[in-house]
Amino acid sequence: MESPRRVLVIDDDKSVADTCAMVLNISGFEAVAVYSGEEALELARTREFEFLITDVVMHPMNGIEAAIEIRTLQSPIDLWEQRHRRLA
């Protein structure tokens, strides 16, 4: 049996991040929600992900900056923003 695809969800709005991760988990993915770019980087140093879904407007590290940093740690990783545009 194939293992579930691992997804990292980043959003500073906890209810959005948690809901997105919950829907993905129900749909058969292994999704983890974090609430800042910094928290995402910390987790990406210890766990591998295949997909990244991120809010773009966050502070102090925005979603694009977090995605670029995570991509240096884990390549290849598919990057998507919440408007469903592929970033890279």
Image (cartoon, helix red, strand yellow):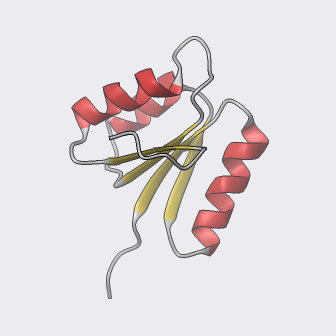
Q: How many marks?
A: 0
Residue extending farthest to the bottom is: 1
Within the image, what quadrant is residue 82 found in? top right
Coordinates of residue 20 in the picture (x, y in percent): 66, 54
Q: Is residue 19 left or right of residue 50?
A: right
Q: Quadrant of residue 70?
A: top left
The picture places residue 62, in percent across and down from the top left corner, at: 53, 20
Question: Would you place residue 18 above or below residue 36 in this image?
Answer: below
Q: Classify residue 88 as left or right of residue 27.
A: left
Q: Quadrant of the C terminus?
A: top left
Residue furthest out toward the top? 60
Quarter location, residue 64: top left
Residue at the image position 49 percent from the left and 46 percent from the top: 85
Query: In this picture, is 27 found above or below 49?
Result: below
Residue drawn where x is 73% and y is 45% of the image: 16
> Could you tell me which residue is drawn at 22 percent across and 48 percent down?
76
